[in-house]
Image (cartoon, rainbow, N blue to C red):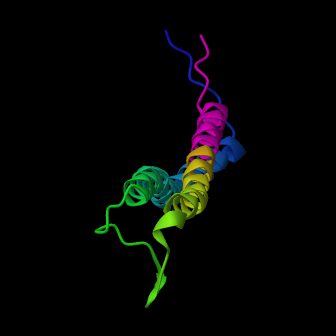
Amino acid sequence: MRKKSTRSISDLFSMLFFYCTTGLLSVIVVPVLATIAYGFGFCTVLILIAGIIRSFGATWVQMDIGPGLSIPQEWSMVWALIIGGIVGSIAYFSWKYLRIYLNFLSRSYRKVLPVNEQ
């Protein structure tokens, strides 16, 4: 014979609050952070490859600051390292905070899980 787990009304409301808030928030936070992390990480690699290719004379790779303001070919790798560093750090911090958020959800989920008493 199984015993029913005894949960108070406050435990029930805390579970309800947890599932309602994290469910809605996770639908927004997880895809946005994952897209930024992977997209910006991929762009970092492309920026660095473009800087290397342009440094060796590829004229079809354009590095412009604005209309009519092009980076000189000699500065291509320096410019790629600066911009790649900025974009890469955005990717890194998005990935880092995505992992922090998912760990937080896992810990919180374990706290509100009903305990099976036997």
Instruction: State yes or no: residue 29 in magenta.
Output: no
Residue displayed at 59% across by 35% down: 106
Residue displayed at 58% across by 60% down: 78
Q: Is residue 49 above or below residue 70?
A: above
Q: Give residue 80's position: percent from left, percent from top.
A: 52, 60
Q: Quadrant of the C terminus?
A: top right
**Which residue is farthest left?**
60
Q: Give residue 76's position: percent from left, percent from top.
A: 49, 63
Q: Is residue 7 above or below residue 86?
A: above
| Region of the chain picked out in magenta, as a range | 98-118
**Which residue is farthest bottom?**
67
Quadrant position of residue 114: top right
Horizontal side, residue 99 vs residue 58: left or right: right
Q: Give residue 95's position: percent from left, percent from top.
A: 56, 46
Residue displayed at 60% across by 25% down: 5
Front residue of 78/112: it is 78
